Image (cartoon, rainbow, N blue to C red):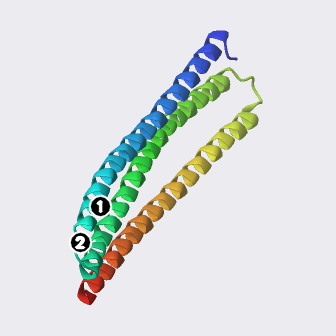
Amino acid sequence: MLTAEQIVAAHKANVETLFGLTHKAFEGVEKLVELNLQVAKAAVGEAAEATRAALAVKDAQELFALQSGLMQPAAEKAAAYSRHIYDIAASTNASITKAVEETTAESQRKVMALIDTAVKNAPAGTENAVALVKSAVAAASNAYESVHKAAKQASDVAEANFQAMTATAVKASQNVTSKAKRAA
């Protein structure tokens, strides 16, 4: 049977875990805000440069060349920005997943210790019930592991697809830019 001290300790551990996960989530948000500030600052500077260059254009052909010259870097920057956001999200997710896995493992150890204690103190004739509880805990643990592995595989596939999509988008912008330059 659980004592009041054990219950209070469990609640304290849960609160600490919650605050730890919240802290990790805020770290991810801070990184996103920092990235967006950097991007905004760079965009303002680049807009000023592009405006100056556009104002210095003498004819339509020069303007067309200027526009086509700006397309590829813009696409590459958009792809880089997307990669940074993905990296931040993946890093934050990995931190939270690790914390959840550690907490889950600790909880499983405590449940197994509680079951072992109950088994030692169980009256004669309850072996079947104890075996059933142990079997249920093992099945739940196996189900968790299966779900965790499937989620990891899905995450790996999503990351590979994201990388391929980004590479394709950058390559397409390079092709469009090179065609536009040849046309000019």
At label 1, the amino acid type is Thr
Q: Earlier in the sequence, mark 2 or mark 1?
A: 1
Task: Name the secondary structure under disc 2.
Answer: loop
Quadrant in which the C terminus is drawn: bottom left
Task: Look at mark 1 in the image and give the residue it sits on.
Answer: 51
Measured as percent of width and height from the top left, residue 117 is found at: 62, 23
How many numbered marks appear?
2
Give the label on residue 105, or none: none
Q: In the image, what residue type sits under mark 2?
A: Val
Q: Which residue is mark 2?
A: 57
Instruction: Pick whichever, 160 or 1, lies toward us.
Output: 160
Q: Name, please, the residue furthest toward the bottom.
A: 183
- Secondary structure beneath disc 1? helix
Report the side of 157 relative to 175 (left or right). Answer: right
Q: Position of residue 128 (x, y in %)?
A: 74, 37
Q: Which of 126/155 is in front?
A: 155
Image quarter (top left, top right, bottom left or bottom right) of the N terminus? top right
Q: Residue at x 28, y 55 (%)?
A: 48
Q: Residues within 10 Å of mark 1 (few under 14, many from 20)?
A: few
Residue 18: x percent and y percent?
55, 28
User: Would you call the spot at circle 2 few (<14 residues within 10 Å), some (14-19), or many (20 or more)?
Assistant: some
Measure how far apart labels 2 and 1 are at the Cα level.
10 Å
